[in-house]
Amino acid sequence: MKIRTRYAPSTTGRMHVGNLRTALYAYLIAKHEGGDFILRIEDTDQERYVEGAVEIIYRTLKDTGLIHDEGPDKDGGVGPYVQSERQEKGIYLKYAKQLIEKGEAYYCFCDQKRLESLKTEVVDGKVISIYDKHCLSLSKEEVEKNLAEGKPYVIRQNNPREGKTSFEDEIYGTIEVDNSELDDMILIKSDGYPTYNFANVVDDHLMGITHVVRGNEYLSSSPKYNRLYEAFGWDVPVYIHCPLITNEEHQKLSKRSGHSSFEDLIEQGFIKEAVVNFVALLGWSPADNQEIMSLEELVKAFDYHHINKSPAVFDMVKLRWMNGEYMKAMDFDTFYEMALPYIKDVITKDLDLKKIASMIQTRIETFLDIKDHIDFFEALPEYDTAMYTHKKMKTTEETSLAVLQEVLPVLEAQDDYSNDALFATLKEFAASHEYKNGYVLWPIRTAVSGKQNTPGGATELMEILGKEESIARIKTGIELLSK
């Protein structure tokens, strides 16, 4: 049997990290076994529809390398692959009526007032209304009369109230629920559109989906899915429910976190390959515990049986570290091309931007880190002269002032401001005064940068700044230390 998985996003905007993981795992499961990965657009919930959402889905899948084998733009013979187009063909109503004929579903004509009068129960922490099967007892004649009169209706699943229903999940094992907890969920809404749950079952069967990957919030709905499969006489797919993704405080990752979607993370300066790598490890790890993995390596290594049951923590520290590793491994030209827009956001002066980029490549973890590492090139910041004191270099504000005053005429006389020439001059200066190199270089680096930490040493910074600016900054340092 050829494995077929699907990613079926709703058109609700940016791709949440949890949805990206679902798509990624579905892709990896299919590709690991040489199977097919299908894209299906679920757009029947018009209240939640976000303009441009379909374009976001396509762009995100392309950016992450999750190339689908079938979808709205790649007909594999089981389309349409857009739910609203399937709705127009009457697919869902057709199958709902089949269930009615089998006694597995029924028309419900109850109005809102009656529904609001029904008793409620708390299930999984949520207060839900339990439908009392009132319309199940309507005669065929009553149903036909109501339909002929155009009375609004929904179609409900006819679930048993007695006994238990169980199903197998590859991660959580056997799940069993009391049928008393299975509400008669709506299959077709009053507007004629299918509910998410019903459309999923029908579409997955008709598209030959063998493995269904989704978040574990759908565990409680799965018994209802199974009863639909059984009612139709269809094969039940393999279920793979993924653990919840939480923030560092073990709360569900929400949009308010500011990094809940793929696009959020890209805007925050992360590399798409690093994000994919990180998301793959949110609830799964390879047998050898390797952490840095390309998409091709993930395809080879992915075994869904190693997915964890416990919630996965979105560890921003780990993502930043991983992103930094990807940056270090980049060839410089690629890094420079990606970093350049961020550098130009900070640097407006005519400086050697390539040299600046080469200085920061191994020092940053995201592209947004660039600003704090290079802003001093644009303008000398205000700084505390206490930075001139460094125990290891054995410098103080007083000794730094003396060094800057002594070295200033030497640097003013220097014409060659290349890194090598400057370093040779300062090394000779230090030796002639019986100073250690750091004793001289620390105050100069502080004076030309105004920063505690910089992406390069004193002479590297001066090479980029040039003679005029370097001298001006050293004079500013002397002035500050003289107060």
Image (cartoon, grey):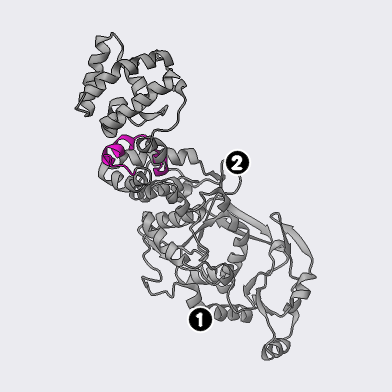
Q: Is residue 351 magenta?
A: yes
Q: Position of residue 191 (x, y in %)?
A: 62, 78
Residue at 70% from the left image edge and 54% from the top image edge: 125
Q: Is residue 73 left or right of residue 464?
A: right
In the image, 399: left or right of 104? left
Residue 420 at least partly seen: yes
Q: Bin the neighbour count of mark 1 within 10 Å (Cα to Cα): few under 14, some 14-19, many 20 and up.
A: few
Residue 291 seen in the figure? no
- Image coordinates of residue 262 in percent, x first then y, are 46, 53
The one of 78 and 321 positioned closer to us in this rendering: 321
Say which residue appears at 52% left-offset and 78% top-offset. 87
Residue 3 in the image: above or below residue 296: below
Q: Which mark is residue 226?
A: none
Specify start and end residues of the magenta stretch as a single range: 348-370
User: On screen, 190 above or below 387?
Assistant: below
Residue 88 — which label?
Answer: 1
Q: Which quadrant does the N terminus fall into?
A: bottom left
Of the image marks 1 and 2, the number of the one nearer the N terminus = 1
The numbered dot on residue 249 is 2
Residue type, mark 2 in image: Glu
| 93, 60: nearer the viewer | 60
Q: Amino acid at mark 1?
A: Glu
Quadrant of the frame with the C terminus:
top left
In the foreground, 394 or 135: 394
Viewed as shown, does residue 82 lie left or right of 115?
left
- Element carrying mark 2: loop
Position above or below: 348 against 392: below
Mark 2, other Cα within 10 Å: few <14 / some 14–19 / many ≥20: few
CA gap between label 1 and label 2 equals 45 Å
